[in-house]
Image (cartoon, rainbow, N blue to C red):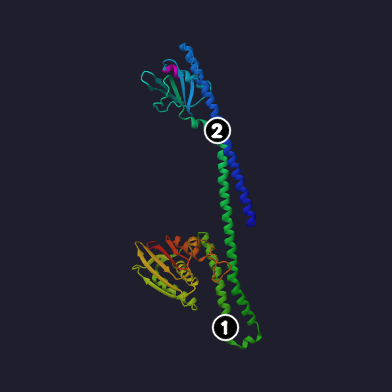
Amino acid sequence: MKRNTLRLVIVLAILCIVGITVTQLYWVQKAFNLVNDQFERDVNIALHNVAEHFFEISHLPPPKEDPIQQLSSNYYVVMVNSEIDVQQVEAMLKAEFSKRDIAVDFEYGIYDCNTDKMVYGNYVSLDENEADKSRTLPKWNKQNYYFGVNFPTMGSYLINRMGIWIFSTVVLLFVILFFAYTLFVIFRQKRLSEIQKDFINNMTHEFKTPISTIAIATEVLKHPGIVHSPERLLNYATIIQNENQRLKKQVERVLQIAALDKEDIGLKKEKLNLHELVKHAIANIELSFEDKKPEIHYEFHAKNPFLMADRLHLTNIVYNLLDNAIKYCKEVPKIHISTENKGAHLGLTVKDNGIGIAEEHLRKVFSKFYRVPTGNVHDVKGFGLGLHYVAIVIRAHGGTFDLSSSLGNGATFSFVLPQDQ
């Protein structure tokens, strides 16, 4: 899928999700308001019936104004003209709420004109095991006989009454989460596709030069007169051999990474002297880069350089670090290697004066096939597998690693491995 097409699809999908979400929120709000209005109507009717019943049994005339006042969303007061019987009020409230199917906890309190205080009545819960929640209800500012009714759990009660809207909202939430995950997968696959494309381009670039060189050398060797020039014959045969070895190493590196990704490293641990192993890697790297003539210095501070590790993989780690330090240096490569003991661990640090790595690429360089973007310039050969290999092998040995660098100031790579495994 083309980049512009992918962007268009994502934008349209996001707009659809936003539209559905806004619509859902609107209707949920409308549904909540309807449920709340219905609840308030039912409560008002129930309290009016209680007030009328109270006036009838007390033989009192009803007040001229509405005896029911709603002081807050869940707090109501009922005005009467005489003292109130607590048990009588509670029985009437339960009966009226039951008729109206108002199945919610409530508490009521009675105002005593003699003491000018709200006297608590009772907390009526649908749960028989509910602990006593007695408290004093707020006093009203009017001096009159009244009782107050409060619904402390009204919010959760209204939400439970919404039923299908809650379910649809949860479903929508799952849809949004799934959509977000899908976007994550799409962008991840897109990134992997780009990395794969870069890998193929790098591999083509890596293989093209030795193949072309071998082809040219082969054409020369096919000339009949070459047999009369043994030196030229030996020279071109050596070129073919060297380029073949180069191709072989590249293929082995790719196959090696494939084996590591299957978590089948197969470490063959033995007792190694890290100092001797580093010296051996330095000797090999200096032969490989005779043209650059790197200046490699080492300081072995570790008094105990022995550890249990795989000789082949550990040698490859050190070689890869030195190889990167030399390849990514535009001047004369100057590399400093040091070791030190850290408790039961052995650490190694490789510091160079190369071109460095920008901060945004520091963690990405350990990903498979990842190479720091250089535009169309491919002056440094490689597949982006070296540091990925280093990270996998160090983790397999139970060690840790760290990379610090900044653009133009070289890089410092260090790792620590346990010595007692």
Query: Horizontally, is 77 left or right of 192 in the view?
Result: left
Horizontal and vertical percent for residue 287? 48, 77
Of marks 1 and 2, which one's residue comes earlier in the chain?
2
Q: How many marks?
A: 2
Q: Quadrant of the N terminus?
A: bottom right
| For discs 1 and 2, the disc positioned in front in the rendered view | 2
* Label 1 SS: helix
Dot 2: few (<14), some (14–19), or many (≥20) neighbours within 10 Å? some
In front: 81, or 386? 81
Q: In which quarter of the image is the C terminus?
A: bottom left
In front: 114, or 379? 114
User: From this viewpoint, which residue is outermost toward the top?
Assistant: 59
Horizontal and vertical percent for residue 93? 47, 20
Report which residue position mark 2 lands on.
Answer: 32
Q: Which amino acid does label 1 sit on?
A: Asn
Q: Give the range drawn in magenta.
A: 86-90
Q: Do the residues labelled 1 and 2 touch (CB within 8 Å)?
A: no
Determine whether 120 is above or below 58 in the image: below
Report which residue position mark 1 lands on.
Answer: 235
Our reading of the magenta stretch's main secondary structure is helix
Residue 379 highlighted magenta (yes or no):
no
Query: Horizontally, is 59 left or right of 245 in the view?
Result: left
Dot 1: few (<14), some (14–19), or many (≥20) neighbours within 10 Å? few
Horizontal and vertical percent for residue 85? 42, 16
